[in-house]
Image (cartoon, helix red, strand yellow):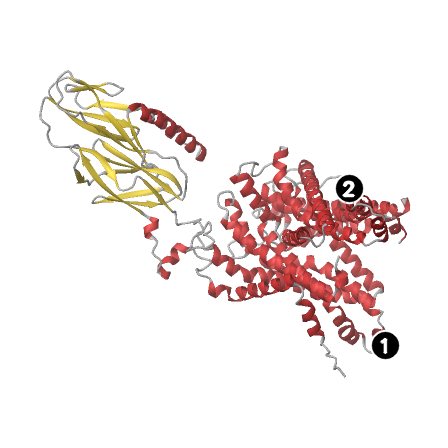
Amino acid sequence: MKSQKTYSFYQLFLKKFKKQTMAVIAFWILIGIFLLGLAGPWITPYDPNRPVTEQYEEKGIDRTNEMTGMIQITGIMSDGAERPVSEVMLQSSNRQISSVSESSGTITITPVGQGSTTVLIAKGDVATQIQLDVSVEDTPPILTQLLLHGPPGKVKKGDILQLELEATLSNGDKLVGLEQIRSNLQQLMGARKTDSHEKNGFLTARKKQSEEVGQIHYQSTDEKVIRVSPDGMVTALGQGIGQVKVSIGPVSTIVPIAVETPQQEPVLVKIKPSQTHIALMDNRKHQQPSLLHWFGTDHQNRDIFSRVLAGTRETLFIGFVSVGIGAVIGTLLGLLAGYYGRWIDSIITRLTDILLAFPGILLAIAVIAVLGAGMVNIIFAVAVFTVPIFIRIVRGSALALKQMTYVEAAKSIGVQDFVIIMRHILPGMLPVVMVYLTMRIGTAILLGAALSFLGLGGDITAPEWGAMLSAAKDNSRNFFYPTFFPGIAIVLTVVCFNLFGDGLRDTLDPKLKE
Amino acid sequence: MARYIIGRVLGMIPILMIISILSFLFVHLTPGDPIRIMYGAEMDMATYEKVKESLGFHDPLYVQYGRYLQQILTGDFGVSYKSKTNVSDEIGKRFLYTLGLTFAAMFWALIIGLVVGIYSAAKRKSIWDRLGIISTTTIISIPEFWFGLILMQIFAVQLGWFPTSGSGTFVHLLLPSITLGFGVSAIIARFTRSSVLEVLQEDFVRTAKAKGQRESVIIWTHVLRNALIAVITMTGLQFGFLLGGAVVVEQVFAWPGLGSYLIDSVLARDYPAMQALILLFSVQFLIVNLLVDISYSLVNPQIRYE
């Protein structure tokens, strides 16, 4: 005879559950999330509560290269030779974005804020501009250098000559000739004007300045030697050495012109920086996601990846504890109502009706309005929201189980009510309670996060997913990552709980399905 | 029928009473002295007593409750501690915003939910059906405030199609209402699917199939008509969900409705406003549930005689 294999309840359950692929996957992901939650505080790459900049030194990460910009400058003389320059005049047009300093031909730029600005390097009549972007991209190029080509041969008195002007833009483009420069400049200045207008509406003073900027100014240092017209025509008037200075806004250059005299010492005509456009990252807050900070950093420069990891525990804690409290109270009341019936039942059922008369989140908000904002109160609020649902389910289930023959039998032989409830009724409804427990944890996490997001959790500096979203929502228009990653963590966890709950339901009690 | 409706309305009265008592007790349940919150902590005892007297806090609780009941029945919800304006005026200003948002959200939820649900059921076990099930499970798990922030980031900030927040025109309504309706659309889709599948098992569907009727005709004439009764009820019940969700979504999009008023008043401990809003939200919820029950009993006569 073939021996029939018998399965225990748990083996049967496992056999059935394994067929629910999605639920099994969700279950394993949940195990992973639990482990992360348990290990959270120890495996975070950074301290979730402190700005990362404070931690770089401890971790031996050197980020000074990325944080400060170094620029070498060399001077180009009128005879084409390169010479080192020092003691230049430096000016950062927006000190809120960066500060600059110079030592022996090297300029150090340290960002202080975010935005786009220019640094002016000047020596005598020669001035060069560098474009500096801190944590911004796609800024239009600006004019950085000017160069006037001197006359090729000897200049005689009475000669009229046109000096060729060459302009270099921060993206490396060169514009040659007045016409080209003029037409391009107008376009460039226009773009910059609207740009600055958009970013800060109160910069009226600078707007005026930038209107003048578009003009090309010629100037002669010695009117007796040479005269220069506004469109750059140079007339030699007398013997000697004169200089023509040309400037567009802050950028300027000179060219020496010797009229009927031999050329003398070459003068500085151009300051050549090693870079005309420098892009820096502001490391003090809102760093973009990178290899160093997978999820970026938030408004206090705390590592979001570490915070999400550390927040796993707290978020799961809110979900479990609140649903746990709600389920225990709900199950007890439901058992009382279902088993004893009569006036106990009607009181408890009325209570449930009233609690269910409020839409879920409003009930929770009302509880917090009474208790005050705070994480613990969020747990209570979510528990209160969970209680009536469990009362309903358990009561219905108890009503059905009470009719069972074995319960009647137990009653008829005089078993105490407490024993009947604990031994015969509670185990019978355990599958249903378990299913709802799992499904409710997802909802509880969502509700807890929503309350926390609304600012009802009190402390929004805590690494909890809802609180992180709440803290990041004011900057959500400029930076997506501080809100994106905690949100994804919530979605993943809740999806897994829901899928796992669905799987449990289909396995334990197919009748429950819709 | 009339008897059923009257019965249901009368049945609401005790619940309304308890809700009004709870909202009345609100001020007394909460820690902190409402007078101190209203007028600041530094006030001498004499003025304190005077204010207490003028507000009637000396009277026994049942007298105060009677007065409160009288006030709310005449639509007077008191004066806000924070803005010192009439709470009912503020509610009147904001009520239509929340109502508009809720209805627009329900519109999206119904359109998306019904289309996805019916399609999933008609093409059951296909790849689209599976995709539908997976995406509805995911959508239900998405916090709506986060979804709103993402939509805002994509469509308002990156693409610039919609304003990020505020109110006034139809365009302002689009993002908040889609955000709010999205979660409910998943619930409606799931429910529609299972409801349609259930009706597909019925004998009359088999008969229709047996006589060679086309699948699309069966779905549109025989199945939907029967399946939609349950869907309509379920949809009505989702209004409560939407009212709650509106609280969060309004906060995300700075929508000047009742929800953002509620959160502001909770954070500012503005009790008269809180009291009024919690009362209003639960009464709204009760009325919607009542309307759903009545409309359900209109389409399904069995329920009336239970």
Judged from the image, the secondary structure of the residue bearing numbered disc 2 is: helix
Of B143 and A153, nearer the camera is: A153
Q: Is residue A204 visible?
A: yes
Judged from the image, the secondary structure of the residue bearing numbered disc 1 is: helix
Q: Which residue is mark 1?
A: A409
Please, which chain is the residue tagged with disc 2 on?
B
Please tell me how crowded label 2 is: few (under 14), some (14-19), or many (20+) other residues with Cα within 10 Å: few
Decide: is B134 above or below A274: below
Q: CA distance from mark 2 to mark 1?
A: 55 Å
Cβ atoms under marks 2 and 1 closer than 8 Å: no
Q: If the image is split into quadrants, where does the N terminus of chain B sit?
A: top right
Of A3 and A378, nearer the camera is: A3
Q: Residue at x 80, y 63 (%)?
A: A396
Question: x%, y% of residue A236?
Answer: 16, 18
Residue type at numbered disc 2? Leu
Q: Residue most toward the top?
A: A158
Of B120 and B250, nearer the camera is: B120
Label disc, if present, on residue B73 of the rendered structure? 2
Decide: is A395 above or below A458: below
Q: Is residue A326 visible?
A: no
Residue A513: which quarter of the image? bottom right
Question: x%, y% of residue A261?
Answer: 9, 24
Decide: is A147 above or below A11: above
Of A212 and A187, nearer the camera is: A187
